[in-house]
Image: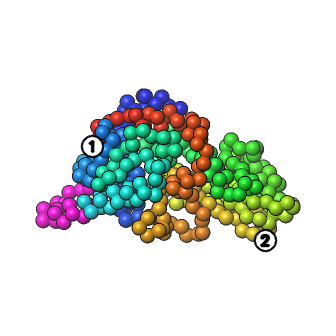
Amino acid sequence: MTNIDTFFDSFVLKLSENYPRDSKMHFYADYFELVSLFNKDNIISVSEMLDRLKDEGIIKQEKIIEHQAEKNDDDEIFVREVFNLLEQRNISFGNDYPFIYSDERLSLKSDINNRQKVYIFLLLASNLNLFKDFQSDLTTEFELISQKALENYLPDYAVIKGFGKNSEFTGYICDKIRQLAKIMNLRTNEEYLKTISSKGTQDLGLDIVGWLPFNDNIGNYISVFCQCACGKDWNKKLNETRRYNKFLNSYLSNITHSLFIPYSLINYNDSVFFEHHEFGEPVLLFERKRILSLIEDKNIYDTLNTKELIEKCVTFEENIV
């Protein structure tokens, strides 16, 4: 892993782009949390975030003076809406939330416990563009956390297998698919497997598999095929596991396709997900709230290789507001 002290010597926190305010408000909420995390005083207000977004060019000034007053009102309403979303997170995550919301001010708690640090891990994994030096570690450990969440979501008798780089499946991807089919009592569709490079090593979008077997050798049961995605373009990975519908012949049942993302995607006002227009096909979504609620192991934080990075984030201070 990159030298953490060296990384933070030149670390600058800045919103990567001007996201659409209506559908991607959760990105702004994440950014506000990061500002509170790294701010010297660990506290932010509406006026401070308005100034910061102006300084970064996210909020732009009108060229026509008489239009500026109306725009100022709209910008302030938007920032207050983001703070309202932070208030809802504070309520929803409860003691798992590492921040305190009060009177349109967000502040970092003075004594962060390990579950709250797992929240911070998910926050960092949602912002790989800011932590590119640690991208491999964050994405690898997000898969491990996602696998643990799936284990806790499904019944105790479920079989859960990682299908990524460090799994029990070996060889080229066609070999791995055949190995998976064998233990799942499924048949492969060799005609479709022939369309894959015989020397292909990519997992073709499948990171975790879970199924609820019966005490027989019939491949008819509930199964979940999961993709883990940390990038901002997670929507492009929604259908990646669906190619396994062609590679494997499930018997008289359909595969449930699932996506794990570290983002906090719940729109509490409407009881839907932000960006739900992206979901063209049925999908079982595990986002930040769902994942964290399924992490029952109190010691999972101590197993993370990125623990040192998270600890540094908690203590690091930069006067950025």
Q: Nearer the viewer, mark 2 or mark 1?
A: 1
Q: Quadrant of residue 60?
A: bottom left
Q: Quadrant of residue 187?
A: bottom right
Say which residue appears at 54% left-offset and 51% top-offset: 292
- In-front residue for pair 47/130: 47
Q: How many marks?
A: 2
Q: Which residue is mark 1?
A: 321
Residue 156 x %, y %: 72, 54
Is label 2 in a helix, a strand or a loop?
loop
Looking at the image, tell me whether mark 2 or mark 1 is earlier in sequence order: 2
Question: Is the residue marked by circle 2 packed among few (<14), some (14-19), or many (20+) residues within 10 Å?
Answer: few
Please say whether residue 58 is one of the residues in the magenta stretch.
Answer: yes
Colour theme = rainbow
Say which residue appears at 61% left-offset and 45% top-offset: 297
Tell me the quarter of the image containing the C terminus: top left
Please say whether residue 181 is one of the residues in the magenta stretch.
Answer: no
Say whether residue 79 is left or right of residue 202.
left
- In-front residue for pair 155/5: 155
- Above or below, 218 against 293 in this view is below
Residue 162 x %, y %: 69, 48
**What's the magenta region?**
56-75
Query: What type is the residue that disc 2 sits on?
Result: Leu
